[in-house]
Image (cartoon, rainbow, N blue to C red):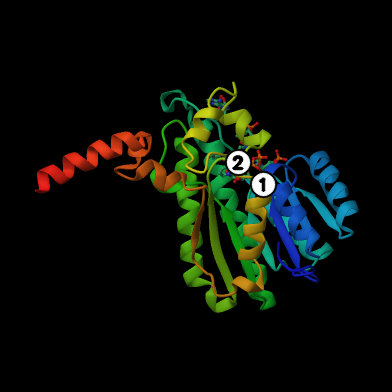
């Protein structure tokens, strides 16, 4: 956790801030003194989260209804954000849509729904806020939450993987172009973190959770608190020179699955003794 009041006087805008990871992000930024503004489709969920966090931290959390797929709604949400809280110092594109599916079962609307939320929604929010910040001559730290399969690709979540990869390239491109306006753009690529929103759509029966854990060399899923603390650091002045970075945050999953010899983890000490002897014998 950063020192108390690290975000005192700062405004933090978080899409999808009412649930799961977004709720965790809002809690941490609010605890550190920020005024948070959270936006998504379900205003009742947002309001309940805002009230709960605000009463816990003593700092104001505002809720704005916004479907990020709708550029008009995004424009209105950004005007409201500026009206009620001022220009944001931190912008987190966290909202997403996803489900596992055979790709041959995807309709064009299924594809459009996911890519509209993840890629276009992130673009509308970023462009709308970016333009306002440029006009106001104010910098900000932008953060996007993607996923480790934005790099590797993944079966059965093809629209999400494609859209998240687009979000990463958008962040890197704007890190180059808008640094001159004092804006920074970074990305966190999380591995699996148990939230209702994600797990109900990616593991609806619950039977893959153990498999997911077995793919993690640290032997456990990530937590909302862990990602929220990393996000707070990346968006704080302590990280002011971090720009255009993609931080993998997966308990070692990516390297564990890709390393050529990692499956030798199952070899016992006795077997290693035997293997060593064989290798030494061929050397002599
Ligand atoms: C195939 C499906 C489907 C499914 C929906 N569709 N679910 N197709 N398999 N399981 C199709 C529908 O038939 C429809 O196409 C189109 O997708 C839109 O569906 P709607 O239900 O009308 O969409 P909507 O009400 O807008 O809801 C969007 C949603 C929903 C994405 C489908 O799940 C949602 O609201 N999700 C938000 C939260 C979320 O997904 N969180 C998880 C994030 S986890 P047709 O052709 O019939 O009209 C994550 C990364 C995790 O992103 C990484 C882990 C490591
Ligand atoms: P979640 O609780 O389902 O969060 C998704 C959020 O997005 C919800 O608050 C939802 O709010 C909002 N949202 C969805 N569609 C929207 C739209 N059209 N407009 C505005 N907001 C919309 O799941 P989560 O696990 O916390 O996911 C948060 C982020 O982490 C996502 O970007 C996800 O891809 C990423 N991630 C999660 C995991 C994981 O294992 N949990 C791993 C890697 C990456 P409404 O329903 O109110 O709109």
Q: Which mark is residue 206?
A: none
Q: Is 119 on the left-hand or right-hand side of 84?
A: left
CA distance for labels 2 and 1: 7 Å
User: Which of marks 1 and 2 precedes in the sequence?
Assistant: 2
Residue 181 shows in the view:
yes
Q: Is 111 on the left-hand or right-hand side of 199?
A: left
Q: What residue do we see at 59% from left, 24% from top? A: 206
Residue 80 shows in the view:
no
> Which quadrant of the frame does ligand 2 lie within?
top right
Mark 2 and mark 1 residues within 8 Å of each other at the beta carbon: yes
Residue 233: x and y in percent read 64, 64
Q: Which residue bears the numbered disc 2?
A: 193
Vertical side of 184 occupied by 97: above or below? above
Q: What residue do we see at 58% from left, 55% from top? A: 144
At mark 1, the secondary structure is helix
Q: In front here: 103 or 270?
A: 270
Crowd band around label 2 with a 10 angstrom C-alpha radius: few (<14), some (14–19), many (20+)? some
Quadrant for residue 182, please give it: bottom right
Q: Which residue bears the numbered disc 1?
A: 224
At mark 2, the secondary structure is loop
Crowd band around label 1 with a 10 angstrom C-alpha radius: few (<14), some (14–19), many (20+)? some
| Cβ of mark 1 under 8 A from ligand 2 | yes
| Cβ of mark 2 under 8 A from ligand 2 | yes
């Amino acid at each position: 956790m950063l020192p108390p009041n690290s975000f005192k006087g700062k405004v933090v805008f978080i899409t999808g801030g009412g649930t799961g990871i977004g709720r965790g992000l809002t809690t941490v930024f609010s605890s550190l003194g920020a005024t948070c503004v959270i936006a998504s489709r379900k205003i009742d969920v947002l309001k309940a989260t805002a009230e709960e966090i605000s009463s816990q931290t003593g700092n104001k959390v505002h809720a704005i209804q916004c479907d990020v797929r709708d550029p008009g709604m995004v424009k209105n949400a950004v005007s409201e954000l500026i009206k009620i809280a001022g220009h944001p110092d931190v912008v987190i594109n966290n909202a997403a849509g996803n489900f596992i599916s055979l790709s041959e079962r995807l309709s064009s609307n299924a594809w459009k729904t996911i890519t509209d939320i993840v890629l276009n929604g992130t673009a509308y929010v970023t462009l709308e806020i970016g333009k306002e910040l440029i006009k106001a001559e104010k910098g900000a730290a932008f953060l996007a939450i993607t996923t480790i399969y934005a790099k590797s690709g993944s079966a059965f979540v093809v629209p999400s993987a494609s859209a998240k990869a687009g979000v990463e390239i958008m962040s890197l491109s704007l890190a180059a172009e808008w640094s001159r306006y004092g804006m920074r753009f970074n990305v966190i690529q999380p591995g699996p973190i148990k939230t209702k929103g994600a797990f109900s759509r990616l593991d609806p029966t619950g039977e893959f959770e153990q498999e997911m854990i077995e793919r993690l060399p640290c032997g456990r899923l990530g937590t909302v608190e862990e990602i929220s603390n990393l996000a707070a650091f990346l968006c704080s002045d302590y990280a002011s020179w971090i720009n255009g970075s993609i931080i993998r945050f997966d308990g070692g999953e990516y390297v564990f699955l890709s390393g050529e010899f990692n499956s030798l983890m199952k070899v016992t000490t006795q077997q290693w003794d035997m293997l060593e002897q064989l290798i030494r014998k061929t050397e002599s």
